[in-house]
Image (tube, helix red, strand yellow):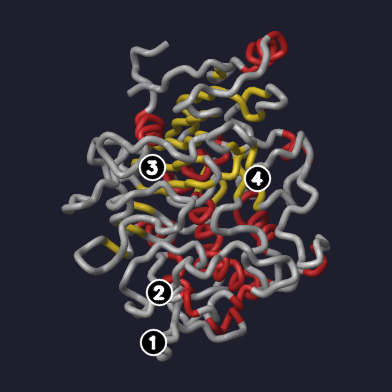
């Protein structure tokens, strides 16, 4: 199914000026039921962007057309970007994939049902830690401590020890962020700037604090199914508080202490980055850790990220995200690396191929606050696609996969016969 035009404004490649003129002449309108408010798709190869499509509105109230350079909260694709930074620290010997992560947390992380089984960075990154999201993962106020969540018995899968069973849990990534902070002494969002975003020339940030004013002014607003804003409706500015405020409502970031609150900047889903920025991340991975003369990772580190660390088999994991914000269905995840999904798993019950062509692409999907996103790479062909849509909290199921219909549409892209 091709990308259907939305009854708003169409931006394709160099038509931004024309769209801006049209915006001044036409009233703003949300998309009709069943269609996204904004839809952006960027195709690329190892050398650069090959096609850009952007349709709809980044901000309904402002009547601002969306572009491939506008930053959006890409949800769980954030995890892949965090894993790239973590692997840089592994290369620098500041982190170890297979050591007990308790040493870097400053407190003991154990499943109470398996107190003698250490939990490692590798297990956190690959969702094999035996943690769950049942006790929460993001709602840690500025003045609270992340360690309180694993102390809640609901945080643990007591039926499966760490190391084998796959259960997708967002909580893994605030713990990764806490370990990264303690390893470096740097605040997580600033560390991500240093390790990944700034070297690649990407204007992005986790939870807005590290983004400049020009980037924040281009924020893509996220909407519910009624077209009401639910995230990043800042009227061209920055949020009053970029993190969850302290218990008394204050927002003094100088309260930050390394490793205490790894959830503060939402490592599990809080990256604001444009589709073009995602394409640059994709090209880095297609380039075995280097892009446009900038090398961030050794090729062997990229291969370690992208290889399957878990493959679905009877009784060894869940194949969908259990958190209510997700839109995945059974068979959505059947192979997983280090914060990397591997698509098109040839096993019974696996429906993890939104492209429908059987190619084992790597990357990650995202789903939160009405947004659906994807970054997928065909390593053999040397090509990839980055996309997102907004205003789709209850998207229709896909025709041939456990992904939604709009994700199948965005993955495959427009029909060549379309204008």
User: What is the number of the mark on residue 204?
Assistant: 4
Res 20 → quadrant: top right
Contact? badges 2 and 1 (CB < 8 Å): yes
Name the spot of residue 70 as percent of width and height, x first: 63, 33
First of labels 1, 4 by sequence position: 1
Q: Secondary structure at mark 2?
A: loop
**Marks 2 and 1, how far apart at CA:** 10 Å
Mark 4 nearby-residue class (10 Å; few <14, some 14–19, many ≥20):
many
Task: State the mark number for residue 377.
Answer: 3
Q: Residue at x 68, y 37 (%)?
A: 219
Q: Alpha carbon of mark 1 to alpha carbon of mark 4: how far?
A: 39 Å
Of the two numbered discs 4 and 3 on the same chain, state the one appearing first in sequence: 4
Q: Earlier in the sequence, mark 3 or mark 2?
A: 2
Give the mark nearest the N terminus, 3 or 1.
1
Mark pair 3, 1: CA separation: 37 Å
Distance between the alpha carbons at the discs numbered 3 and 2 = 28 Å
């Amino acid at each position: 199914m091709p990308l259907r035009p939305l009854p708003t404004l169409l931006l394709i490649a160099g038509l931004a000026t024309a769209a801006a003129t049209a915006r001044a002449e036409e009233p703003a309108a949300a998309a009709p039921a069943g269609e996204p408010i904004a839809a952006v798709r960027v195709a690329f190869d190892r050398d650069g962007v090959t096609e850009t499509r952007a349709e709809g509105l980044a901000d309904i109230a402002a009547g601002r057309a969306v572009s491939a350079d506008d930053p959006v909260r890409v949800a769980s694709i954030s995890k892949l970007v965090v894993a790239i930074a973590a692997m840089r620290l592994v290369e620098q010997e500041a982190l170890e994939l297979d050591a007990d992560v308790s040493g870097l947390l400053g407190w003991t992380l154990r499943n109470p049902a398996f107190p003698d089984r250490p939990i490692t960075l590798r297990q956190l990154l690959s969702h094999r830690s035996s943690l769950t999201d049942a006790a929460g993962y993001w709602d840690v106020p500025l003045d609270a401590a992340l360690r309180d969540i694993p102390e809640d018995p609901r945080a643990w899968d007591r039926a499966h020890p760490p190391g084998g069973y796959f259960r997708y849990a967002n909580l893994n990534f605030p713990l990764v962020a806490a370990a990264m902070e303690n390893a470096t002494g740097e605040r997580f969002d600033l560390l991500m700037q240093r390790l990944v975003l700034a070297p690649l020339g990407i204007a992005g940030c986790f939870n807005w604090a590290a983004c400049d004013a020009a980037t924040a002014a281009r924020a893509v607003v996220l909407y519910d199914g009624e077209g009401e804003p639910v995230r990043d409706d800042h009227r061209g500015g920055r949020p009053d508080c970029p993190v969850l405020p302290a218990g008394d409502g204050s927002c003094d970031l100088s309260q930050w202490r390394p490793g205490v609150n790894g959830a503060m900047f939402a490592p599990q889903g809080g990256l604001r980055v444009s589709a073009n920025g995602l394409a640059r991340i994709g090209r880095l991975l297609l380039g075995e850790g280097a892009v446009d003369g900038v090398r961030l990772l050794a090729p062997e580190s990229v291969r370690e990220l992208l290889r399957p660390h878990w493959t679905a088999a009877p009784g060894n994991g869940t194949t969908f995200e259990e958190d209510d914000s997700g839109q995945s269905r059974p068979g959505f995840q059947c192979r997983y690396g280090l914060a990397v999904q591997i698509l098109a798993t040839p096993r019974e019950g696996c429906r993890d191929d939104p492209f429908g062509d059987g190619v084992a692409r790597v990357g990650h999907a995202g789903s939160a606050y009405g947004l659906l996103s994807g970054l997928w790479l065909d390593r053999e062909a040397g090509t990839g696609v980055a996309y997102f849509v907004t205003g789709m909290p209850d998207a229709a199921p896909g025709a041939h996969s456990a992904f939604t219909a709009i994700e199948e549409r965005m993955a495959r892209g427009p029909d060549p016969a379309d204008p």
